[in-house]
Image (cartoon, rainbow, N blue to C red):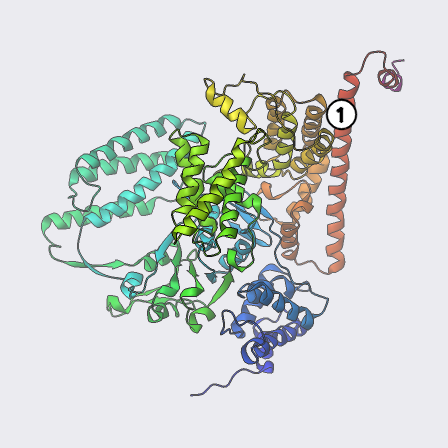
Amino acid sequence: VFVDQLTSKDMEFIGNSIFPTIDEKIIAKMVEFNNRLVQEVCMEKLWGHKGSPWEFNLRDIFRWCQLMQTDQSPGFFNPGQHVALVYADRMRTEADKAKVLSVFREVFGEEYEPYCGSKEFHITPLNVQVGFSVLRRSGEAPVTLDPPLSITHQCLKPLESLMKCVDMGWMTIVVGPAASGKTSLVRLLALLTGHHLRVMAMNSAMDTTELLGGFEQVDIMRPWQQLLETVDYTVAMVIRRGLMSLDDGTQDTEFLLQTWGIFCQWLKENRLQRPGGTVNSEALNKLEVIILLLQKLNTKLKVFTDMSKLQMDFTLLKERLAQLEDGWTNGGFEWLDGMLVQALQAGDWLLMDNVNFCSASVLDRLNALLEPNGSLAINERGVIDGKTPRITPHPNFRLFLTMDPVHGELSRAMRNRGVEVYIPGENEGVCWDTLDLKTLLHSAGVTGDCVCDLLIQIHNGIRSAIWDSPASSVTSLLHAASLLSCQLQRGADLRSSLQHACTEAYSFCQRTVANQKQAQQVIEQHLAIQGTADWGDGLLSAGVWPDGFPSALLSTEDSCFSSVLRDGQVLLFCLNSLSLQGKRNRPLRLMDLQLALQSSGVHGDSVFSGGVVDLEEGDALRLISTAVRLVTERASHGDWILRSSWLSNLGRSYKYLPDPVLVQVEAGNRALRAVFSSSLAAKGKTLAELLQPHSKDEYRILMDMRWNKQYLDILTNKCNFEDEERYMEFLEALNAVANRIVLMMDREERAVTCCCTISGAPQSSAMRVATAFNKGNV
């Protein structure tokens, strides 16, 4: 049966019928835009050759309309906000991405401007936001994280697209060359949102059994090990919360930790942690005590809302052990679910890494699951109660695919059912930001701006000198950083550690002897800079040492403090720059670190001096006021007390700074407290709460909501204003309160500054006399 292709009129009729709230003119232009791409890319093949064949069909228009209905309100629909996600992000070159947006402007005119990402990152205990994408957090942090992850500026744009696909429940296909950060991007999002991510490494020998499951001989050790893993994770989470709490649960936490340690030692002695052991009733009785202690402590701390599944798994294990002792299951077989089925039922996230290694016939089993309201039928399990087992996905289940297009493309059916997001690599004209590289090096254990600069220079020198070098990617740079960190931890000196790490990472991997000698010459040439007198004498870079950018793990575990640190980076850099001019009680240079290591240790009364200043004194002083404002004006009703305490701690930590600097910090602190103690802050909070009546997240209600314009737009779009006039009136009222708060903060800062200036002036000075006259004392 031949089905003819849908015409433009057909697509417009379908769109108007399914999405009646969207204006018919907008849908008509969306269909016209889609057909233009089909004509130029698929039929005439004028551009978009890399990654072809492409398909632009009704599914894309449906996704586009669903995004508009979800994020926008009737009367304020803007198709430009999501055109990049649906159409441009899949393109493999920057020129093709720009061409898609150019076609959009030609079709829609100047009325709608396409949105290309803002790279604004915000995280609170309840939500994580990048641009217009917002996801709720589950609150669970991983017990271990290896390797460490960093939130770089370069990853925010694809992260925003990935978050929007997760929010809509769509499968995401992350495409990019090797070492472009595809897997790390998905792991980063799972970490920030607190979801459990399962990773399945695909290969050409994989069949449906590994995806769906199969029959295996009954083994009591299998559910025993799964239960131990669950209890281990639960114990770690409960103990972490208990040790950080200040209530009466501390003693119970210590008792649980001691009991769990004794139980783990007993398991090791009896070899019950390995597949070859045998479970007995004694082991179950000991584990039951642990579970009872967990339930008791969890009732106090409220870490998990429901632990019934853990108790149910333990009860099933006891029943299976009783059956095994009676001989009911000897030689029997049981069905074991595959990783896909386990994730579907538990609501976990599943990442299929290098999915294009797998056979297309195996992946076709996912087609029915990826349809709207789809489900997965497991025919391999047989018929149960007269029916074929069919699994409906858990609402929290999400599927991610990653692939390197060098190894082939996915089938057109699979690509059509997901949203592609392409991440360009280093060989495609995308250069890493220097600060991003230093952040990655710092997470790998490298300390100091001069050391980071030296590693980056060696890396770039090798890439320029040897065009076919296998060590030209950022992976080699991180490998060298890890080796350097390991050498320093073992007590080696810096020069020999750099020599060994760079030789191992860049010289030994070269394919010819000539290239190895050339790489060694480049390394020796750059390492010679260590002999100069001023090397290591300047200020260590902002965001690297001593006040590093918050890592992904810190942002997950303590989102409030990480937001304060992120907003205070400029202030910390200015304070550290000024501290280099005189005395300081913390090491800021590489030379300071060497002096600290030569002494008995770094103590609170240690004083360092000397150094080279990168900023002139006047420039740093002028930046202080603005840097303090970045901390105070971005405060929310949930974290302003933390910001005030942090500013007070800065004044005590940098006690050797000039008085005008400390006065500026104290003035910002007092102004912050004065604003949140006034009725203006309460009025601004009331207006913001009108936009989110069902949300209790005070960390999202900023003192000035204009600092998070994307979230303000999201809230206003969901309020369904009667008309544009009402919308503008509300924004004017919100802006008026914010402007009055800014003026009040400025007045409070000036008052503190003038008071401190007057108190420090001589008694007979003109300033003191004028102030006394103004108060009527003269």
Q: Secondary structure at mark 1?
A: helix
Locate residue 625, reporting x and y percent.
72, 33
Which residue is farthest left? Answer: 327
Locate residue 107, reporting x and y percent.
67, 73
Tell me: 607 left or right of 491: right
Residue 33 falls in image quadrant = bottom right
Identify the residue at horizontal 24%, vertical 38% (top origin): 287
Q: Residues within 10 Å of mark 1 (few under 14, many from 20)?
A: some
Residue 356 appears anywhere in the view: yes
Residue 574 falls in image quadrant = top right
Residue type at mark 1: give it. Answer: Thr
The quarter in which the C terminus is drawn is: top right
Q: Which residues are magenta?
A: 771-778
Residue 122 falls in image quadrant = top right
Read off the residue under disc 1. 753
In the foreground, 197 or 390: 197
Task: Look at the picture and state if 547 lies above or below 397.
Answer: above
